[in-house]
Amino acid sequence: MRLQKYLSSAGFCSRRKGEEYIKDGLVKVNGIIVTELGTKIDPQNDRIEVNGTLVQADHKKVYIALNKPREYVTSCDHPGEKIVLNLIDIPERIYPVGRLDKDSTGLLLLTNDGRLHHRLSHPSFDHEKEYEVTVASYVTDGALRSMGKGMPMMGTKTRPAKIKRISSKRFRIVLKEGKNRQIRRMVRKVGSRVTELKRIRISNIKLGKLSEGSWRYLREKEKEGLLKTL
């Protein structure tokens, strides 16, 4: 089967978009970058990746919401550390969508749907992520406004964010990007320190009352709403 047709038939992207990924050097076949259109692959035996995401066809698609506890690493394999996959016992092989650092808690999505994984992980698709933040000392209204407008960070500037104060040391923030430890860095820039960071929403999926360390399958309406964003 031609490589771009496989990407389309697996539901990862359109055939035309697949051709763009191939020409841009984002597609690997068995670990080797392929840039030639029309390359043929064996869907049963070849391993196909797009920008690091495994593309699989003809498998049961699984969508899971997990309330990640502290001290768990958002990874499929991290020697010497507890990983989020240790908390989920299902036969299907799934992958975390995006990252949630070791010291943070809250909503993490996991799936074997390569297309969804790619779209939710990539910052260009503008999916909202909402966090509840507790800080060590009072952050002024002016500081919150500065965080909301965007701040210089890591050689660039953060995108505008929605921020709502809950109390003197707690606020909620909605981001459409996910730079490394972004919220913690932003809070340090305004003179405080994050003591607790919990993600409570990704796009239309809410953490709700899911207890820490527990997981559940997404409901049909949740899946439909999420997949509509693709």
Image: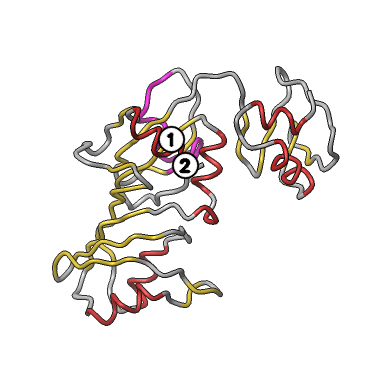
Q: Is residue 57 above or below residue 38?
A: above
The residue singled out by tag 2 in the image is: 97
Q: Amino acid at mark 2?
A: Val
Range covered by the magenta-colored residues: 74-90
Of residues 60 and 179, the one nearer the viewer is 60
Residue 33 locus on image (x, y percent): 78, 41
- Find numbered disc 1 in the image and state the secondary structure of the residue it sits on: strand
Mark found first going from the N terminus, 2 or 1 = 2
**Callout 2: 10 Å neighbours few (<14), some, many (20+)?**
many
| Residue 197 in magenta stretch | no
Residue 3 locus on image (x, y percent): 76, 31
Indicate the quadrant where residue 85 lies: top left
Residue 136 locus on image (x, y percent): 21, 69
Residue 102 locus on image (x, y percent): 38, 49
Query: Along the horizontal axis of the image, is 218 left or right of 139?
Result: right
Image point (32%, 29%), residue name = 219
Indicate the quadrant where residue 34 lies: top right
Q: Main secondary structure of the magenta part?
A: loop
Image point (22%, 64%), residue name = 171
The residue singled out by tag 1 in the image is: 110
Work out how far the residue at label 2 is from the one at label 1, CA to CA, in angstroms: 6 Å
Query: Along the horizontal axis of the image, is 137 left or right of 158?
Result: left
Q: Is residue 39 above or below residue 175?
A: above
Indicate the quadrant where residue 108 lies: top left
